[in-house]
Amino acid sequence: MAAVTTTPRQKAGWGTANFVVIALAMIPVLWLASLSFKTPAAVLDPSLIPSQWTLGNYSQILKTSQFIRPLINSIGIGLIATLIAVLFASMAAYAVARLRFPGKGVLIGMSLLIAMFPAIALVTPMFNIERSLGLFNTWPGLIIPYVAFGLPLGIYTLSAFFREIPWELEKAAKVDGATPFQAFTKVIAPLAAPGMVTTAILVFMFCWNEFLFAISFTSTIASRTAPASIAYFSGSSQFTVPTGPIAAAAVVITIPIIIFVVFFQRRIVAGLTSGAVKG
Amino acid sequence: MTASTDTVTSDQTAKPGKRKAPLSEGARAERRLGWILCAPAVIVMIAVTAYPVGYAIYLSLERYNLELPQAVKFIGFSNYAAVLSSPYWWQALKVTLIITVFSVAISLVLGMLLALLMHRTLFGRGTVRTAALIPYGIVTVAAAYGWQYAWTPGQGYLSAAFNNSAPLTSEVKAIAVIILAEIWKTTPFMGLLLLAGLSLVSEDLQKAAKVDGATAWQRFTKITLPLMKPAILVALLFRTLDSFRIFDNIYILTDGANGTGSVSILGYDNLFNALNLGIGSAISILIFICVAIIAFVFIRLFGTAAPGTDIGKR
């Protein structure tokens, strides 16, 4: 590609294609944002730009524990599940990338199976198991399945990252007089950190997005996550559909995703593709 | 790719002694360490999937309704007979297959176009990738509400653009809207996986073919596509199984009304509306079998290119 000179026509062509992709990706999101700023009267106007603007939808949802509590649940459950999943996945991925032991293929095959597992098949039995163990409608009741489904993603992505680390450096550091602990914290950990951050972002996004378990294994806002809580929003009277508040809540839970995507675009792309294709 | 192979080789040559004598003290310690490190992950994965599936098999052979806890009784395969003779199951399976086939096929084509654009575009590459990641990352439920309101007559821009139509109230149109929402959400993931495959296709080969007079289309079909086959298969397998599990979009868009429910919606409704654990578990097991068949067919059809076998070689 380097030697090819670009004509203005080519430039315009690629520019148009870029524009189309960006527009298709953004318009549904902007529409949701626009709905969230519309007054109840303006909601009935299908234009993309609100005819009357308001922040009322946001103040309404941020005032009630019906949304704030689930938001806290989402953050807490997501962070704890991510932490555990990344910890367990890095241990397993280190073993896969560095050690020789029988059963490695089984571990990888098992992760692959779970990555493709139909979550609904677990809902009925897990519902009964969680009820009898007292896990139903608790944080651990969601954290445990999230860890299990985050693990395959983590093991895949991390073993791809760990395989790229020049492990000889560890030996070199030891030759230069570093203790094993120093060799790990000063040499290996900084090299492994980017992969672990990427994996953590992907796992957190999975937990943040999850809906089926979130509505199946919870019954109150004690443990219901934000996406599930939106489905239970009700209007100010039983005859009004709470379009504005739902749109505002949808925008609120989209903000962290947009922050991740904007700041970590390269890492997310690398993480998603390294595990799946280089595998 | 090359970098990773290099490290692996150098890594292996770094400790040849351990490889030649598998029963040495060091090798045994390495084995043990490997198992210990994998144990937590394995235990969690088994506890959350294998055990409940086994339990579901057991539950599916019982008459077990939460409203009639005294009437629990072993009834063999009657639950399966009830599900398989029910029109609801076949309707849900049909809807699921239609959504899967259309959304995967269309998102494959669009994903390929997106991958080519992300690979080749002259400027704004980062911006395009960032924009494409938004549908991938957005919470499905949030996006689904966006689509629902967009297609609501009198308030949605898409409904207004199509003569104030109300597609979510008719079966075929609602399924089309669901497919559209799926395509919007999943095309970026497809595009990114294909982009990774695309970057493995050598530029030199393309140039050589160009010198030999191959047209752009010939280069795409004769060089790019065959070399990308593994990446395409991985993307297809993952997307097909993912699409077969469709739940969130349908739950928000139609909640399965007008015969638009997928098998996952059927399983959910059975548990939470009918409170029937026996039938629900039978549905779970049938869905599990369907997914196993799909995965098996993929791996059989595409042989060594399938991810499962790739992994075995590692």
Image (cartoon, coloured by chain):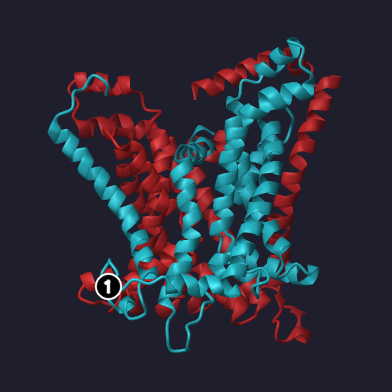
Q: Is residue A203 left or right of residue A140?
A: left
Residue at image location 37% in from the left, 27% down from the top: B201
Could you tell me residue B246's position as x and y percent?
48, 63
The residue at 24%/22% (across/down) is B209
Q: Nearer the viewer, residue B135 or A52?
A: A52
Q: Residue at x 33, y 37 (%)?
A: B125
Q: Is residue A188 above or below residue A270?
A: above
Q: Chain of mark 1?
A: A
Of A53 and B1, the residue lying toward us:
A53
Circle 1 Cα neighbour tier, 10 Å, few/some/many (<14 / 14–19 / ≥20): some
Task: Name the residue carrying label 1.
Answer: A51
In the image, what residue occupies the spot 59% across and 70% down? A215
Q: Is residue B13 above or below residue B58?
A: above
- Residue B180 at x, y percent in the picture: 34, 62
Residue B40 visible somewhere in the drawing: yes
Asked if residue B244 can be seen in this view, the reply is: no
Question: From the viewer's perspective, is A29 left or right of A156?
Answer: left
Residue B217, quarter of the rendered image:
top left
Q: Percent from the top left, x then y, of residue A152?
A: 62, 45
Q: Is residue A18 left or right of residue A6?
A: right
Q: Is residue A251 left or right of residue A201?
A: left
Instruction: Say which chain is red.
Output: B
**Which chain is cyan in the picture?**
A
- Vertical side of B250 occupied by A183: above or below: above
Q: Quadrant of the C terminus of chain B?
A: top right
Q: Quadrant of residue B128?
A: top left
Q: Amino acid at mark 1?
A: Ser
Q: Does B87 appear above or below A276?
A: below
Mark 1 lies on a secondary structure that is loop
